[in-house]
């Protein structure tokens, strides 16, 4: 039986190969990076291919791991970009005010001016999560995922309420440049 995308949560992605013996570089999306392998076998997005992952170390912000059946660099390179999923029922429920990224993607973003679009991606560049919102009147833009910027997250209702920081979506063409000339 294949899983649907709603049944799976992406816990990480293979970012490349390391060495000649099939070691993989893995970007983990779990709160504690090493926990990516603690929940049991992972799968691809269709739930058809299973990956038994063992973490063997860390290097430059990524985990180093091995997957059964991947024994050389070529096989490891073939997995680059492979997202690693786990069945949602194997994960603990998130704490209050915590969300799985997969629960946020696709939610409508609403602001004081109405519909802002939908959440396309959630990024973590190291200073906290950032939401990418697309498809609204402002095109594509990013906002920090903080309580101040996103005071309401209503997963069952399919929406978030966004309180945009002043000036974030101002059109620079609408601004009048200051006049630097002086009257003589």
Image (cartoon, helix red, strand yellow):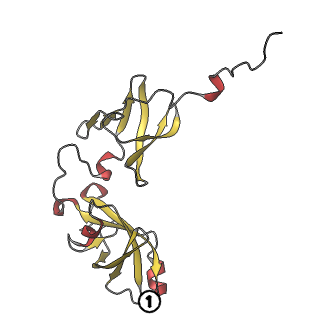
- Given residues 86 and 170, the one toward you in this image is 170
Using the image, determine if residue 169 lies above or below residue 74: above
For image coordinates 73% across by 18% down, the residue present is: 179
Q: Which quadrant of the structure image shows residue 64?
A: bottom left
- Horizontal and vertical percent position of residue 126: 40, 55
Exactly how many numbered labels are in the figure?
1
Please give the residue where the numbered disc 1 appears in the rendered image. 72
Q: Quadrant of the C terminus?
A: top right
| Residue that extends furthest to the top in the rendered view of this protein | 184
Give the side of residue 51 with respect to residue 174, left or right. Answer: left
Using the image, determine if residue 142 lies above or below residue 169: below
- Given residues 59 and 39, the one toward you in this image is 59
- Horizontal and vertical percent position of residue 135: 48, 38
Give the side of residue 77 with respect to residue 1, left or right. Answer: right
Using the image, determine if residue 177 lies above or below residue 142: above
- Horizontal and vertical percent position of residue 156: 22, 39
| Category of crowding for the residue at label 1, using alpha-carbon neighbours closer than 10 angstroms: few (below 14), some (14–19), many (at least 20) | some
Using the image, determine if residue 35 lies above or below residue 181: below
- Horizontal and vertical percent position of residue 118: 41, 39
Give the side of residue 67 with respect to residue 89, left or right. Answer: right
Q: Which quadrant of the structure image shows residue 67?
A: bottom left
Disc 1 element: loop
Q: Quadrant of the N terminus?
A: bottom left
| Residue that extends furthest to the right in the rendered view of this protein | 184
Q: Which quadrant of the structure image shows residue 175?
A: top right
């Amino acid at each position: 039986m294949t899983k649907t995308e709603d049944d799976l949560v992406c816990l990480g992605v293979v970012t490349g190969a390391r060495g000649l013996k099939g070691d993989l570089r893995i970007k983990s999306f779990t709160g504690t990076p090493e926990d990516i392998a603690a929940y049991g076998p992972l799968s691809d997005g269709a739930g058809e291919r299973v990956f038994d992952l063992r973490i063997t170390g860390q290097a430059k912000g990524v985990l180093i791991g091995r997957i059964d059946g991947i024994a050389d660099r070529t096989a490891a390179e073939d997995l680059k970009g492979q997202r690693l999923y786990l069945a949602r029922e194997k994960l603990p429920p998130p704490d209050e005010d915590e969300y799985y990224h997969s629960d946020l993607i696709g939610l409508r973003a609403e602001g004081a001016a109405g519909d802002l679009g939908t959440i396309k991606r959630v990024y973590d560049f190291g200073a906290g999560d950032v939401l990418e919102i697309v498809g609204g009147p402002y095109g594509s833009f990013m906002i920090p995922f903080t309580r101040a910027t996103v005071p309401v997250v209503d997963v069952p209702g399919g929406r978030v309420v966004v309180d945009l920081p002043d000036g974030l979506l101002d059109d620079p063409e609408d601004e009048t440049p200051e006049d630097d000339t002086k009257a003589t």
